[in-house]
Image: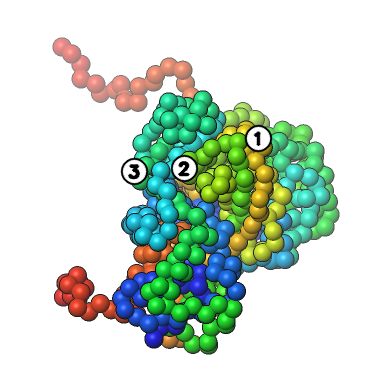
């Protein structure tokens, strides 16, 4: 029997991979409802490994490229790609982004208008990452919890985990050396006046933003990155920067109503890559940083492989003899 | 180079923002061979909430020059300086008071005022200023022993836009350490600043946003050392005519 502390993104993804290998799994979650205590509720839900390549190691692309298919089996995934744009005066940012990423196509004004009719005439050029997609993080977590329960996993909500568990997925609460919080601030807008079909990223030297469409004409607007452990609600500075940038993307967003504001702490290690660490007999999966939905499936598979080695697996045998 | 009584062998001061990850930052610091790094405090970091990141910086064997980046008023800058002293335990403060949101040009009036207040409180102020000589004099009167003129707007990577202004500054303040702060884009910009006789260069974006920040950190270090060595070697004067560099004597005579 495998016990997991934390029914957030990492805990549930691990439970899924472990149950798939036939393990009996019990998860302990402190909060009363799925997703309530998880920082992933503030995530964008972007499945954008190639865009992330701009600022991260190639490993993220490798680990994340299969995330879209993994999630599509669990929750609705919108696969319309990512459109990366920059205001005319920040064209240099677009050039830099293009140089540092792969799997994109340069699109002109006409193509942008075809992809996002509401943005017609606003941008001369952009980058389209056609293979990328997004999901709704809160829905995804609930769908994932339901799926693992169907697979026989027991989830104890509102319950503190026992002192000793097999796998710890408690994010910033984990007692791991070198784990640091990176604060992110976001807003959810109800924007019936502006139709956004896919994830949009607006590049800016100081305040890059992204907009991810959600159900019911909602849009998630994110996100700041601050080296801070402050858990206070978003600051006015962060919000004015985010919202100004959104307004620059489309003035129609000025009419959107702000449905929710949020701030969360992303757990990260010094290299901003997730790690699996053994400490005092417990395996820790942590440091998913801003790549939770993208990297959780691959990291969960690794965790499962460590806990339940598929010894009869041909691939595994090969590796062992190699 | 001596800054407020501290002897430094590297003339590079490196910013710590915008790197792909803290690990890349640490490697860049190492390869830049710099001895001073600068880091900003934001209001939401009050109460030491940026601790994890700062601990990492403080574990390094480099000196920390906290800055007041993003402050727009005297009061803001002074409060941030107080926070910085508390967090990092240093009297050093890189004083930035931004006057214009787009160009990030310093508000030199507020800068002088804040410099006066902070110097009186015992801070050792590194003011981010323009190449204006009168402002420079006012800052020195206010207690600054270092001046940090801009090369170009922060983060623009445009290089040294007002070479002559920097030269005039060098001539006017022969004994004051002058550090070009902001605007450096390439190693050649850094070398140029050194060749003008500047004492040091502070940069951030040029390294952090390079394709390979660690390699760029190394390149900047080399450029600064080359530029300084060139300055000390007294470069030749420019001429408007070609002068043969091969000796005329001993040329074969055509029969």
Disc with the residue nearer the chain's start (3 vs 2)? 3
Dot 1 falls on a residue whose secondary structure is: loop
Q: Chain of mark 3?
A: A
Tell me the quarter of the image containing the C terminus of chain A: bottom left
Residue A146 higher or lower than B103, as above or below: below
In the picture of the structure, the residue carrying the numbered disc 3 is A103
Q: Chain of mark 2?
A: A
Judge by depth and name the residue closer to the eye, A143 or A239: A143
In the picture of the structure, the residue carrying the numbered disc 2 is A198
Q: Residue at x 55, y 41 (%)?
A: A205
Looking at the rendered structure, which numbered label has been put on residue B234? none
Give the Cα distance between marks 3 and 2. 16 Å
Q: Residue at x 45, y 69 (%)?
A: A146
Say if labels 3 and 2 share a chain.
yes
Dot 3 falls on a residue whose secondary structure is: loop
Q: Residue at x 52, y 31 (%)?
A: A119
Judge by depth and name the residue closer to the eye, A138 or B9: A138
Residue A102 left/right relative to B23:
left
Dot 2 falls on a residue whose secondary structure is: loop
Judge by depth and name the residue closer to the eye, A204 or A251: A251
Q: How many marks?
A: 3
Residue A284 left/right relative to B94:
left
Give the Cα distance between marks 1 and 3. 33 Å
């Amino acid at each position: 029997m495998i016990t997991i502390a934390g029914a957030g993104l990492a805990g549930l993804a691990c439970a899924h991979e472990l149950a798939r290998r036939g393990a009996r799994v019990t998860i302990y979650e402190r909060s009363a409802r799925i997703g309530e205590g998880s920082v992933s509720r503030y995530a964008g839900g972007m499945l954008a490994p190639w865009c992330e390549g701009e600022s991260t190691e190639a490993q993220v692309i490798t680990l994340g490229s299969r995330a879209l298919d993994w999630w599509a089996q669990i929750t609705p995934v919108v696969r319309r790609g990512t459109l990366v744009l920059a205001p005319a005066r920040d064209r240099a940012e677009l050039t830099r982004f293009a140089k540092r990423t792969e799997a994109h196509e340069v699109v002109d004004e006409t193509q942008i208008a075809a992809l996002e009719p509401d943005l017609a005439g606003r941008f001369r050029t952009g980058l389209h990452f056609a293979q990328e997609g997004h999901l709704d993080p809160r829905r995804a977590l609930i769908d994932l919890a339901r799926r693992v329960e169907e697979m026989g996993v027991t989830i104890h909500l509102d319950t503190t985990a026992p002192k000793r568990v097999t796998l710890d997925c408690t994010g910033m609460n984990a007692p791991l050396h070198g784990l640091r919080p990176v604060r992110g601030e976001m807003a959810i807008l109800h924007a019936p006046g502006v139709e956004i079909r896919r994830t949009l990223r607006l590049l800016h030297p100081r305040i890059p933003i992204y907009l991810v469409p959600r159900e019911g004409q909602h849009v998630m607007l994110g996100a700041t990155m601050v080296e801070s452990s402050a858990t206070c609600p978003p600051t006015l500075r962060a919000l004015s920067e985010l919202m100004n940038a959104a307004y620059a993307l489309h003035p129609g967003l000025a009419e959107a109503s702000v449905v929710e504001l949020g701030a969360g702490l992303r757990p990260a290690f010094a290299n901003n890559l997730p790690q699996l660490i053994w400490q005092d007999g417990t395996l820790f999966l942590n440091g998913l940083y801003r790549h939770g939905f993208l990297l959780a499936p691959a990291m969960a598979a690794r965790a499962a492989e460590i806990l339940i080695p598929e010894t009869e697996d041909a691939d595994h045998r090969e590796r062992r003899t190699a | 180079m001596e800054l407020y009584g501290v002897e430094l062998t590297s003339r590079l001061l490196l910013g710590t923002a915008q790197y792909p990850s803290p690990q890349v930052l640490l490697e860049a610091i190492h390869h830049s061979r710099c001895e001073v790094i600068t880091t900003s405090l934001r209001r939401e970091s009050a109460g030491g909430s940026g601790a994890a990141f700062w601990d990492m910086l403080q574990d390094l064997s480099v000196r920390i020059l906290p800055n007041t980046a993003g402050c727009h008023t005297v009061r803001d800058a002074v409060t941030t300086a107080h926070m910085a002293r508390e967090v990092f335990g240093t009297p050093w403060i890189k004083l930035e008071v931004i006057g214009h949101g787009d160009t990030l040009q310093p508000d030199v009036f507020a800068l002088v005022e804040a410099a006066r207040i902070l110097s009186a409180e015992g801070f050792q102020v590194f003011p981010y200023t323009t190449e204006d000589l009168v402002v420079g004099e006012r800052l020195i009167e206010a207690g600054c022993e270092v001046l940090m003129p801009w090369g170009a707007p922060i983060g623009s990577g445009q290089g040294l836009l007002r070479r002559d202004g920097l030269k005039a500054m060098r001539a006017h303040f022969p004994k004051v350490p002058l550090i070009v702060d902001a605007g450096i884009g390439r190693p050649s910009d850094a070398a140029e600043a050194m060749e003008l006789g500047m004492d040091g260069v502070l940069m951030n974006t040029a390294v952090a946003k390079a394709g390979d920040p660690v390699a760029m950190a190394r390149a900047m270090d080399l450029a600064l050392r080359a530029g300084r060595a060139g300055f000390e070697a007294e470069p030749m004067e420019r001429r408007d005519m070609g002068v043969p560099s091969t000796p005329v004597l001993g040329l074969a005579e055509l029969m």
